[in-house]
Amino acid sequence: MARVQLVMSDEDRARFTHEARREGMSFSAWMRAAARDRLEARRAEPFASVAELEAFFRECDARKGEGREPDWDEHLRIIAESRSRGAADS
């Protein structure tokens, strides 16, 4: 197994260590998990061509269904109401 040394601020180390303990993990295990999560997040394949991108948006348009999309103020109101209740509508 390889050993890796890295340099970080004392503040970052304290924050990361605190989070690791909160999640029941060692600092090393938490750092490995964070690195894996970052790699997984970047695995999304970009569109290969403009045609593929346009096809994606056509598919999205076809799925939009009936009715209208709420405006931004409505979204914010729903978010605020959900937060005040502590959970999203089910």
Image (cartoon, grey):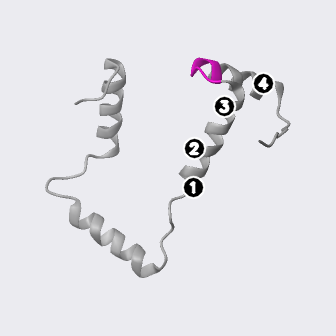
Quick check: 3 above or below 89?
A: below
**Residue designated by label 3:** 29
Does residue 63 show up magenta in the picture?
no
**Residue designated by label 1:** 42
**Residue designated by label 2:** 37
Quick check: 31 above or below 14?
A: below
Residue type indicated by callout 3: Ala
Q: CA distance from mark 4 to mark 3?
A: 19 Å
Q: Are marks 1 and 2 in contact (CB under 8 Å)?
A: no
Q: CA distance from mark 2 to mark 4?
A: 22 Å
Tag of residue 77: none
Looking at the image, tell me whether mark 2 or mark 3 is earlier in sequence order.
3
Q: Secondary structure at mark 4?
A: helix
**Residue designated by label 4:** 11
Q: Are marks 3 and 1 in contact (CB under 8 Å)?
A: no
Say which of 53 and 82 sits in front: 53
Q: Nearer the viewer, mark 4 or mark 3?
A: 3
Q: Nearer the viewer, mark 3 or mark 1?
A: 3
Does residue 23 show up magenta in the picture?
yes
Quick check: 13 above or below 72?
A: above
Residue type indicated by callout 1: Arg
Q: CA distance from mark 3 to mark 1?
A: 20 Å
Q: CA distance from mark 2 to mark 3?
A: 12 Å
Query: For mark 4, does the 10 Å Cα neighbourhood hold few (<14), some (14 to 19), or many (20 or more) residues?
Result: few
Q: Nearer the viewer, mark 2 or mark 4?
A: 2
